[in-house]
Image (cartoon, rainbow, N blue to C red):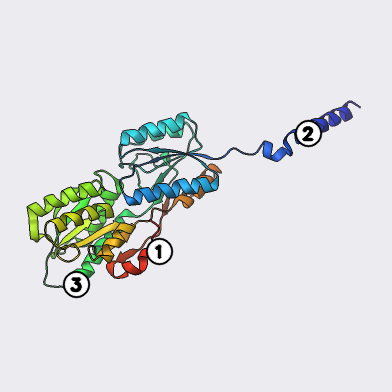
C-alpha cells in the first residue's frame, strides 16, 4: 500500500506541473547558448560586414551573443575575454588584433573550462590546446594569389620592370604578416618585380591615403604597382594617386585584398586592377561550429573559408552579386 500511495503522489505532482506549465518539456528546456565575441573593431567595410554576419546569424539561431568592440586595441580584447570568463559564457570567440600576447588570458579561459574559437585571425601561442579551432581565410594564399596575378600581368610586358609599393595591414596582425609573406614568396628571385617601399596603413582608408602620399613624394613616377593588404587602404591610396595627377589602374597598377563592394566600384571605374576575395560572411558557419563545440563534437583545428580572385574585367558582372 505504501508503494502505491507514493506512485499516486508522484502522479499528482506531475499532473500539477503539467497543469501549471502546460507540459513538462518547455518548462525545463535548455537555456540558449551564450557566446562572448570580441571583434577587432570597425576599421573597414570588410570588418563591418563580418560583424553584421555574426550578429545576424546568432539572432537567427537563437544564440545569445555578448559583443565587444576592441577598437583595434589588444588590451580591450583581453579585458573583454576576462569579462566573458567572469560571466561564465558557454563559448568565447574572438578575432585577435595581433598574433602574440594571448597565452595568459587564454589559459584563464581554459582553467574556467570555456572553449575558445578564433575567427578570421590566428594567434601565436605556446600551447595550441588553448583554443579549439580557427575559422578564417588563408592569408598567405591570398598574398600568393595577388602576386600570381601580377606575374601574369608582367608577362605581357616582358621588357618592363615593376617597382612595387606595399601598404601593409596593422603591425603584428596575422593578415599583415601572412599577406606580406605570401606575396614576397611568389615574387622572390624575379628581377622584374621589386618592392621599393613598404609601410603599414593600419587597414584604414585614411592611413592608406596618408602613406601613399608619402610614397609618391619619395618615389614619384618610379612607382608602377601598389599592393595593398586590404581594399580600404587601396581606396584611400587611389585618392592620393589621383591628387598627385596620376591615373590609378593605369599609371600605377592597383592590387588589393578583401573583395568589398567599394573595390568593385573602383574596378568598374578603371581605378583598381584586381582584388583577391577574403570572405567575411561566415557568421552562420561560426554558429554551427559553436554548437558543435558546446556539444563536445569533434571539429577540425583549422577551417578555411572558400574565396576567389576578381580582376577588373569581371567587376561589372560580379558587382550585383556582392553582399558586402
Q: Position of residue 25 (x, y in %)?
A: 70, 40
Q: CA distance from mark 1 to mark 2?
A: 55 Å
Q: Residue at x 12, y 49 (%)?
A: 214
Q: Position of residue 203 (x, y in %)?
A: 26, 48
Secondary element at tag 1: helix
Q: Residue at x 35, y 39 (%)?
A: 126
Mark 1 sits on what residue? Answer: 321
Label whose residue precedes the other's in the sequence (3 or 1): 3
Q: CA distance from mark 3 to mark 1?
A: 31 Å
Instruction: Name the mark nearer the viewer: 1 or 2.
Output: 1
Quadrant location of the C terminus in the rendered image: bottom left
Is there a contact, CB below 8 Å, between mark 3 and mark 1?
Answer: no
Label whose residue precedes the other's in the sequence (3 or 2): 2
Secondary element at tag 2: helix
Res. 270 image quadrant: bottom left
Instruction: Name the mark nearer the viewer: 3 or 2.
Output: 2
Amino acid at each position: 500500500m505504501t508503494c502505491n500511495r507514493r506512485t499516486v503522489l508522484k502522479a499528482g505532482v506531475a499532473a500539477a506541473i503539467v497543469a501549471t506549465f502546460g507540459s513538462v518539456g518547455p518548462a525545463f528546456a535548455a537555456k540558449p547558448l551564450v557566446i562572448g565575441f570580441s571583434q577587432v573593431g570597425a576599421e573597414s567595410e570588410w570588418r563591418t560586414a563580418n560583424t553584421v554576419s555574426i550578429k545576424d546569424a546568432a539572432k537567427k539561431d537563437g544564440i545569445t551573443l555578448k559583443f565587444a568592440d576592441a577598437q583595434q586595441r589588444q588590451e580591450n580584447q583581453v579585458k573583454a575575454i576576462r569579462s566573458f570568463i567572469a560571466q561564465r559564457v558557454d563559448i568565447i570567440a574572438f578575432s585577435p588584433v595581433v598574433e602574440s600576447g594571448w597565452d595568459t588570458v587564454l589559459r584563464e579561459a581554459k582553467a574556467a573550462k570555456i572553449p575558445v574559437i578564433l575567427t578570421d585571425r590566428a594567434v601565436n601561442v605556446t600551447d595550441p590546446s588553448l583554443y579549439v579551432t580557427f575559422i578564417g581565410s588563408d592569408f598567405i594564399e591570398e598574398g600568393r594569389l595577388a602576386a600570381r596575378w601580377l606575374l601574369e600581368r608582367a608577362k605581357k610586358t616582358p621588357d618592363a620592370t615593376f617597382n612595387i609599393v606595399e601598404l601593409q595591414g596593422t603591425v603584428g596582425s596575422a593578415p599583415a604578416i601572412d599577406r606580406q609573406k605570401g606575396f614576397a614568396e611568389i615574387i622572390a628571385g624575379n628581377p622584374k618585380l621589386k618592392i621599393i617601399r613598404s609601410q603599414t596603413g593600419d587597414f584604414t582608408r585614411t592611413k592608406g591615403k596618408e602613406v601613399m602620399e608619402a610614397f609618391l613624394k619619395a618615389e614619384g613616377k618610379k612607382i608602377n604597382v601598389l599592393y595593398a593588404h586590404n581594399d580600404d587602404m587601396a581606396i584611400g591610396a587611389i585618392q592620393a594617386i589621383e591628387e598627385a595627377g596620376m591615373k590609378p589602374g593605369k599609371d600605377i597598377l592597383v592590387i588589393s585584398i578583401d573583395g568589398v563592394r567599394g573595390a568593385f566600384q573602383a574596378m568598374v571605374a578603371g581605378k583598381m586592377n584586381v582584388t583577391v576575395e577574403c570572405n567575411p560572411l561566415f557568421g552562420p558557419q561560426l554558429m554551427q561550429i559553436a554548437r558543435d563545440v558546446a556539444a563536445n563534437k569533434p571539429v577540425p583545428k583549422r577551417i578555411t573559408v572558400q574565396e576567389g580572385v576578381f580582376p577588373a574585367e569581371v567587376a561589372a558582372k560580379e558587382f550585383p552579386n556582392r553582399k558586402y
